[in-house]
Image (spheres, rainbow, N blue to C red):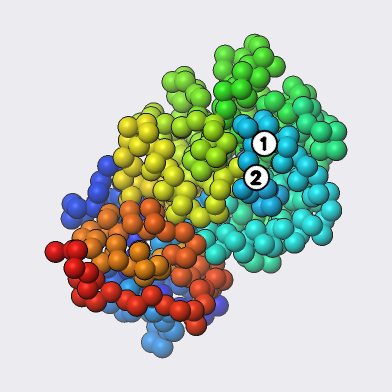
Amino acid sequence: MAMKLIRGEILHFLSDPGEDNGTQRASPAFRHHADGGLLVDDGRIAFCGDWADALAAAPEGTPVDDHRGKLLLPGFIDTHLHYPQTDVIASPGKNLLDWLDRHTFPAERRFADAAIATETAEFFCDELLRNGTTTALVFGTVHPQSVDAFFGVAQRRELRMVAGKVMMDRHCPAFLRDTAQSSYDDSRRLIERWHGTDRLRYAITPRFAITSTDAQLEVAGALAREFPTVALHSHVAESRAEVDWACELFPWARSYLDVYDRFGLLRRPAVYAHCIHLDARDRRRMADCGTAAAFSPTSNLFLGSGLMNLRQMLDDGVQVGIATDVGGGTSFSMLRTLAAAYQVSQLNGYALPALRAFWLATLSGAVALGLADCIGNFAVGKEADLVVLDPQATPLIARRMACAQTLEERLFAWMTLGDDRAVSTTYIKGHRRWHRDAGRPRVRPAGPRGGSPRCD
Ligand code: GUN
Ligand code: ZN
């Protein structure tokens, strides 16, 4: 691809902004350019800075995508969700285990059919792009063909995706059961076929300790040793009943997390979804191993699982990513998920700053997935995956934005009021892969000071 300039307000992160609300002049944690420019060369960032400097860095005649009035961010990174649960979203259950039995396992059975898997993966990837999510860590089903289908679809869209075949050899319906040996063989073949192909990476994916025998957790550990750059992906400590069951099944373990530890499944990159019911030793162990937690607040509320303590995890040095956890989660939107993250954190006595929330949804997710060398911010050389947010997306957002005085306030409005409607464009490797209908009815832009009588 020839070079391209992308103009707009730019925000990206270099590190955790913590409690910084952006009022200090220069923060080492993020870069903000009110009138910014990205120079993209062959799908990678060649320059990021003020527009005048970007223009000076570009060869004469470089085409410009002009998003002035909108905010350019690195694409969102969803650190845990299940593509085969796309059709399970909004299916109620009494609790996690009831929901798995009633809705999830029957739905996953259908993914033995490669045509169903491909059609669902196509819808799923399009839905991610509509929501500004450019990378995700994704569960398949137990069927290896579900992962072949997913990677095939992601590859055609040039997406940077991480996925794996579920390993599950007990405590589930017979029609979804593999064996320790078959899960090893199938995972190995998938790793050899897909890991490092184009922008795709593999994740060894034991569903959770409850649905794997010791023998299967052993082979998951063996695969992890054989393939050190492959990710690990599972669930831990989501609901009380699940924790009790895991502790009964592995009476020798100090804690639920300790089961994974004993089988060599805590490392970097590894992502464990939920992490609600952990103790201080578990958190220390995760921090020491570089093992990340996927915070899935809409799912945790929907299934009544509990309130992950985000502040405590971050204070203890655990890497945290944000996750929609579709279909336990109720939305593909990372903005809606950030809203829930804020609300859950409030119930734990922590008012999550918006800047920190957007760091979690971008760079922190990239670090969690072991992908910070290629995505997560606009550092020179990284892949140009980005999302463009529209401050005029809905009448209410436009009205609230007109009153906002600071970047923090505007980010907070987007994450509290926004959803897929706030995403105007999604770029993959510098190409527009999603753009809201140019001809759709637009909200009338607010005038100077928003034209709103409330805002003085
Ligand atoms: N624990 C084991 N499997 C699942 C799943 O599919 N969804 C959620 N939310 N938790 C799980
Ligand atoms: Zn999950």
Q: Name the residue under label 2.
A: 91
Residue 227 location in percent, x, y? Answer: 68, 40
Q: Which residue: 85% across, 33% down? A: 174
The picture places residue 427, in percent across and down from the top left corner, at 51, 68
Seen as rendered, the residue at the extreme bottom is 61
Q: Does the residue labelled 1 lie within 8 Å of ligand 1?
A: yes
- Residue 186 lies in what quarter of the image? top right
Identify which residue, 364 or 131, lies in the foreground: 131
Label 2 neighbour load within 10 Å: few <14, some 14-19, many 20+? some
Q: Which mark is residue 99?
A: 1
- Disc count in the image? 2
Distance, label 2 to label 1, CA atoms, is 8 Å
Residue at image location 47% in from the left, 48% down from the top: 337
Residue shown at 76%/24% (left/top)? Answer: 213
Check whether the beta carbons of the residues at disc 2 and disc 1 lie within 8 A of each other: yes
Q: Is mark 2 on a helix, strand or loop?
A: loop
Point 64% across, 55% down: residue? 200
Residue neighbourhood size for the residue with mark 1, other residues' Cα within 10 Å, grouped as few (<14), some (14–19), many (≥20): some
